Image (tube, rainbow, N blue to C red):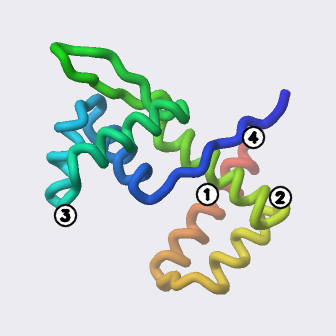
Amino acid sequence: MAKKSYKRLGERELEVLSTVWELGEASVSDVRTVLLTRGPIAYTTVMTTMRKLADKGYLAFSEDEKQYVYRPLKSRTEVRMGLLSDLISSAFKGSSLSLVQTLVSEADISEDELREIKKVIDQLDESEAQS
């Protein structure tokens, strides 16, 4: 079975999709209301972005009292894993190790974040040892 590729998402698309995840389901007005707390955004920009997300298979919609109500078709985790998998394939030639090495050595990671990363790895090691 071929690996499913996730269509790239722009910053605005991710912001809108995250808002729909937070709300569970939402109209364009609902999403715009949330986004307006972060700065100005036109209704038509939100509407176009949500339509594009539906076209890409990230959102579904139904008509409710003369407005479209959108809901996520994919979970936050599913989308993150798909986008990360595509990034590993394209930018790191399929090497998760290269991704982690780059992240740890070149990204601005705090000592607290490094401790948390080590903790996650230790927990995975313990889980595998118990299996």
Q: Are marks 4 and 3 in contact (CB under 8 Å)?
A: no
**Residue type pointed to by label 1:** Gln
Front one among 123 and 130? 123
Q: Label for residue 123?
A: 1
Say which label, 4 or 3, has the lower sequence index.
Answer: 3
**Residue type pointed to by label 4:** Ser
Identify the residue position indicated by label 3 in the image.
Answer: 39
Q: Is residue 121 left or right of residue 35?
A: right
Say which label, 4 or 1, has the lower sequence index.
Answer: 1
At x 75%, y 50%, the residue is 129
Identify the residue position indicated by label 4 in the image.
Answer: 131
Front one among 51 and 125? 51
Disc 2 from disc 3: Cα separation:
38 Å
Disc 4 from disc 1: Cα separation:
13 Å
Q: Is residue 7 left or right of residue 37?
A: right
Dot 1 lies on which element? helix
Disc 2 from disc 4: Cα separation:
26 Å
Q: How many marks do you count on the picture? A: 4
Identify the residue position indicated by label 2 in the image.
Answer: 94
Say which label, 1 or 3, has the lower sequence index.
Answer: 3
**In this view, the mark in front (2 or 3):** 3
Image quarter of the N terminus: top right
At x 43%, y 50%, the residue is 13
**Residue type pointed to by label 2:** Gly
Image quarter of the C terminus: top right
* Residue 56, percent from left and from top: 54, 35
Q: Is residue 95 left or right of residue 110?
A: right
Disc 4 from disc 3: Cα separation:
49 Å
Dot 2 lies on which element? loop
> Neighbour class for label 1 at 10 Å: few (<14), some, many (≥20)?
few
